[in-house]
Amino acid sequence: MTTVNCPTCEKAVIWSPESPYRPFCSKRCQLIDLGEWADEKKVIAGNEDDVMSSDSTIN
C-alpha cells in the first residue's frame, strides 16, 4: 500500500481508488490548492522566449 502526504496539510493519504481526492486528503484541501493556483500563488516556471508567452504574431 502506497501512502503519500497531502500537499496542503501533510496528512497521510493512501494512494488507492478508495481515496477520490488523492493526493489530497479531502475536497477542502483540493480546493485550497486550486485557489492558490487561481490566485497565481503557485506557478510553473518557464522560459521568457516561450511561444505562448510572447507577443509576436503569426504571419
Image (cartoon, rainbow, N blue to C red):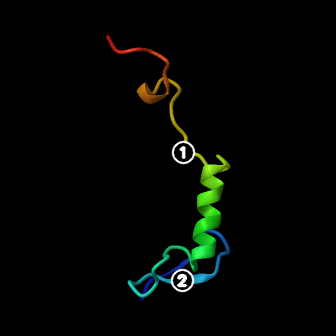
Q: Residues within 10 Å of mark 1 (few under 14, many from 20)?
A: few
* Up-down relation of residue 59 to residue 10 (above or below): above
Residue at position x 57%, y 80% in the image: 25
Q: Residues within 10 Å of mark 2 (few under 14, many from 20)?
A: some
Residue at position x 61%, y 51% in the image: 38
- Tally of numbered discs: 2
Q: Which mark is residue 44?
A: 1
Q: Is residue 18 left or right of residue 6?
A: left
Q: Quadrant of the C terminus?
A: top left
Report helix, strand or loop for mark 2.
strand
Which residue is under mark 2?
Answer: 13
Residue at position x 48%, y 76% in the image: 22
Residue at position x 40%, y 14% in the image: 57
Q: Is residue 32 left or right of residue 52?
A: right
Report helix, strand or loop for mark 1.
loop
Q: Position of residue 12 (x, y in %)?
A: 59, 83
Q: Amino acid at mark 2?
A: Val
Give the quadrant of residue 34: bottom right
Q: Is residue 44 left or right of residue 16?
A: right
Give the quadrant of residue 24: bottom right
Q: Amino acid at mark 1?
A: Ile
Q: Position of residue 15 (x, y in %)?
A: 44, 81
* Up-down relation of residue 40 to residue 3 (above or below): above
Q: Quadrant of the N terminus?
A: bottom left
Q: Which mark is residue 27?
A: none
Q: Which mark sits nearer the N-terminus, 1 or 2?
A: 2
